Amino acid sequence: MTATIQIGPDLTFADVVAVARDGARVELTEAALTALAAGRATVDKLAAAPTPAYGISTGFGALATRHIDPDLRAALQRSLIRSHAAGMGDLVETEVVRALMLMRLKTLATGHTGVRPVVAETMAALLNNRITPAVREFGSLGCSGDLAPLAHVALVLMGEGEVVGEDGKAVPAEPVLTAHGVAAIVLEPKEGLALINGTDGMLGMLILALRDFEQLLKLADLTAAMSVEALLGTDRVFRPELHAIRPHPGQAASAANLLRLLSDSGVVASHRGPDCNRVQDAYSLRCAPQVAGAARDTLAHAAAVAERELASIIDNPVVLLDEDRVESNGNFHGAPVAFVLDFLAVAVAEVGSIAERRTDRMLDVARSHGLPPFLAHDPGVDSGLMIAQYTQAALVSENKRLAVPASVDSIPSSAMQEDHVSMGWSAARKLRTALDNLTRVLTVELVTAARALDLRAPLQPAPGTAAAVAVLRARGVGGPGPDRYLSLELRAAEEAVRDGSVMAAVEKTVGALR
C-alpha cells in the first residue's frame, strides 16, 4: 500500500523521497488547514486596505511601485504566472517536479504565504493523481527562488499549460485535470507570487542527491576494497587506530567499511607477512578512506544545510501570522543551497577520479603485480578492458568540468532589481549529471576488479567482495575470456548497481556498511 505523507512542519528527507520517487500520497493536516485560513485572512485584510501592500495590491519585481486596482488583481495573478512560465529545453524528470511540488506545498501549508486552503488542496490533488506539470530545463536563476519552474506548476493549477503525458511528452493540462476530477483554480491576490517564490526545485534536487550519493559512497568503498584485493594491496592501513589519530568521522567510516569488506580475504592473506617486499601501496589504494571520507563529511554538511532549508518558510512577501502583516525579505535567495550543491559536485568528481586511477592500475601490466595487460585473454589479439577505461576516463573528465561551481556566477535580471542571483538550479542540475556519471565510473571499476579477482584464482576473495562478483556473473557480466561485446556487460552491471542488487548482496554477507 502506498504511504500517505502528512504535510506539516516535520517533513523528512525520507518523506520527500517517498513522494518524489515512490508516488506516495500527501494529506494536509487539520493544523495546516487552520494555518492556511489564518494566513488568508491576513491577506484579505491587507487587500481591502487603502495602503499598498507588496505582492497583494502592487506589481512585482521592478514593477513593484505600481498600485493595482482591485478589479485588475485577478488579471495580475494570471499575467504573473503566464509570463513567468517561460522555461525552455527538455522536460525535467518527474521525480524532480514532484519534489518541487511537495516543497512548495509544505511551505503553503504553514499559512505564511497567505494562499487559500483550496490552492494547497489543489496542489495536493496533482500529487495524489500523479499529474506532473511539464517543467523545462532552463529558466531558473535561483533567485527569486525557482521562478520559472514553479510558474509552470502554477499554470497547471490554473488549468493552463502542459503536463507530462503517458508517453513522456508534454500534453495540454486542462483535459488531464478534467479526466482526474481536479478543478482548476482562479488565483486571488498574493497567490501567484506565493506559488513561485521559493527554493523548492534546488532543494528537492539536493535532497534526492543526498540519498543517491550516500548509496554511491558505499559502492565506492566496495569497489575500492575489490581493487585493493586485485592489486595485492594491504588492509593494514585501514586499521581503526590509524584513523583515530585523524578524527574525521567520514574517514573512519570508510576505513571501517574497507576492513569489513576485506575481512577473511584469501587474496590479502596470501601476501601478508615478512616475505612481502612492498612497503606501501599507491595513494589511490592507501588513501581511499581519506578521499571517500572527505566526501562523506561533505555529504553530512550538505545534509545539515538541507535540513535547515526543509524547515524554512520561503516566500516574499511573507505573512507574519502573529503580527497580522506581511513583510518583504530576501529568504528566497538560493545561496545556502547552491553552495552545498556545488561542494557536493567537487566531492563527486574526486570519488570518481580516484576510482579511475585504481582501474587504470589494474589494467597496466607494469603496475598490476602479475595481471595480464588490460586483463585481456590473449593480449595483442584481445584488448580486454582497455576501452572500458576510456569510457570511465571520459566520464571522470566530464565530472571535473561539472565540478566548476555554478554559484560563483551571477547574471543580473529584472532591470537590475534582482542584481545578484544564486544559480542554485544550475548547480543542482549539474550535480544530478555528475552523480549519474559517478554511477557509471564506479561500475567500470566494479567490472574491472571483478575480472582481476577471477584472474587471481585459486586465491579466494573476501566473502563480501565475492558476493559482488557473484551478482555480476548472475546478471550476465562474464569473467575473463576472449573479447566480446563489452557495452552490453557494462550496462548489465550498471543496472545491477542502480537497482541495488550489488550492495544488497554484499550487505547481506557482511552486514550493513556505514
Image: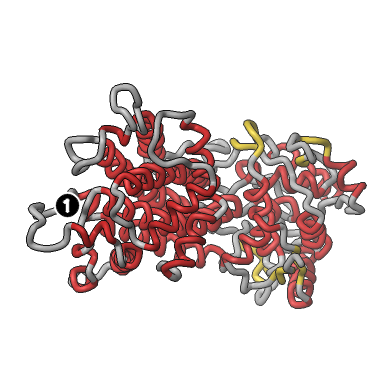
Q: How are the colours assigned in the image? A: secondary structure
Quadrant location of the N terminus? bottom right
Residue 386 to residue 134: above or below: above
Lateral position of residue 86 relative to residue 467, left or right = right
Residue 478 to residue 287: above or below: above
* Image location (x, y in percent) of residue 426: 51, 41
* Image location (x, y in percent) of residue 239: 22, 69
Corner quadrant of residue 25: bottom right
Lateral position of residue 308 relative to residue 444, left or right = right
- Residue at the farthest front position: 458
How many labels were placed on the picture? Answer: 1
Q: What's the residue type where badge 1 is placed?
A: Asp
- The secondary element bearing badge 1 is classed as loop
Which residue is located at x 73 percent, y 37 percent? 168
- The residue pinned by badge 1 equals 281
Lateral position of residue 206 relative to residue 76, left or right = left
Which residue is located at x 44 percent, y 58 percent? 467
* Image location (x, y in percent) of residue 264: 30, 66
Corner quadrant of residue 331: bottom right
* Image location (x, y in percent) of residue 302: 43, 60
Q: 494 or 435: nearer the eye?
A: 494
Lateral position of residue 204 relative to residue 26, left or right = left
Q: Is residue 42 visible?
A: no
Q: Residues within 10 Å of mark 1 (few under 14, many from 20)?
A: some
Q: Is residue 207 visible?
A: yes
Which residue is located at x 37 percent, y 38 percent? 396
Which residue is located at x 67 percent, y 67 percent? 112
Corner quadrant of residue 509: bottom left
Quadrant location of the C terminus? bottom left
